[in-house]
Amino acid sequence: MKSKFYFFLRTYLGFSRRESRGFILLIPVFLLLYFIPNFYNKVLENENIEHYIEYQGVIDSMLEAGFHLYQPNFAKFNSPTLQDTTKKSSSYQRREAPMLKKLDFFEADSVVLQVVPGIGQKMAGRIVKFREGMGGLLHKDQLLDVYGMTPEVLDRVFEYFDFKPGLYRKLNINQADVFEIAKHPYINYGAAKVIVAYREQHGDYRKPEDLLQVKIFSEDWVERVSPYLIFE
């Protein structure tokens, strides 16, 4: 078969033996050039479908969270009775823009948080993880403890969301194990081990000041973390 193909190239196309070999080597290249664009278009089409599904999920989450999406009335602009807007009307009265109803920050999930300019998927996930680990927030500025958060983005967050300080869950310092305690953003794993070890040796903590019996803890640290703890 191969020799017949060589014979065809030399006889009918006038190729030399060297040119025939070169032509055969180029055939796979031609095939790749033909199939790669089709393959790329197929992959791109699948990515577009995935992006559309993700986008639709964001829209659905926003609607469930209470956002109202604006739908322009094109019929109004195509109306034959539309007047020339370049002429200033004497009866013109300025209308105030409607205020956007803010959503509760503590009800926003990682998808809804991405409506804020400057917050992507990873940042939104870190915010939710921090908020859940804290069990609530007492001050807006606590979000600056989230890795990557800046004061500018923080201000934008609360242009979209309403913040009501409060805690919906506290950490029971006398019942939680090391891993549960270490999930709190203000308590690292080493501190959690010391807390549990001291508790097992000396009994339950009765008040925040009992944590000062552990020499590695400072008054500032105890004051910072105690609002998020239960001493029972």
Image (cartoon, helix red, strand yellow):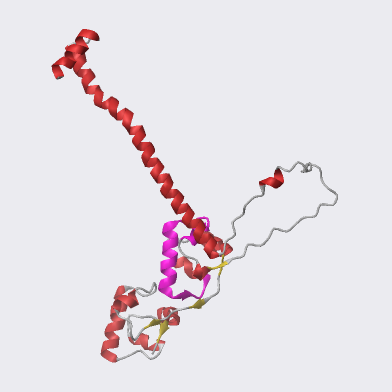
Q: Does the magenta stretch include residue 155?
A: no
> How many badges with numbers are in the image?
0
Q: Where is residue 119 shown, x and y percent of the image?
A: 48, 57
Q: In which quarter of the image is residue 15?
A: top left
| Direction from residue 115 to residue 183 in the image, left or right | left
| Magenta-span inclusion, residue 115 | yes
* Near-viewer residue (220 or 14): 14
Looking at the image, residue 113 lies above or below residue 80: below
Q: In which quarter of the image is residue 46?
A: top left
For the C terminus, the quadrant is bottom left
Q: Does residue 87 sit above or below 181 in this rendering?
A: above
Quarter placement of the N terminus: top left
Instruction: Considering the whole magenta stretch, tell me its main secondary structure.
Output: helix
x and y, in percent, of residue 188 in the image? 33, 73
Residue at horizontal 46%, vertical 61%? 149
164 or 16, which lies in front? 16
The x and y percentages for residue 60 are 50, 59
In-image side of 75 versus 176 (left or right): right
Left or right of 142, for residue 88 = right
- Residue at the spot 81% in from the left edge and 42% down from the top edge: 87
* Up/down of 208 relative to 45, above or below: below
Q: What stretch is highlighted in magenta?
A: 111-140
User: Looking at the image, can residue 211 be seen?
Assistant: yes
| Residue 146 in sight here | no
Is residue 204 left or right of 15 when viewed as pictured?
A: right
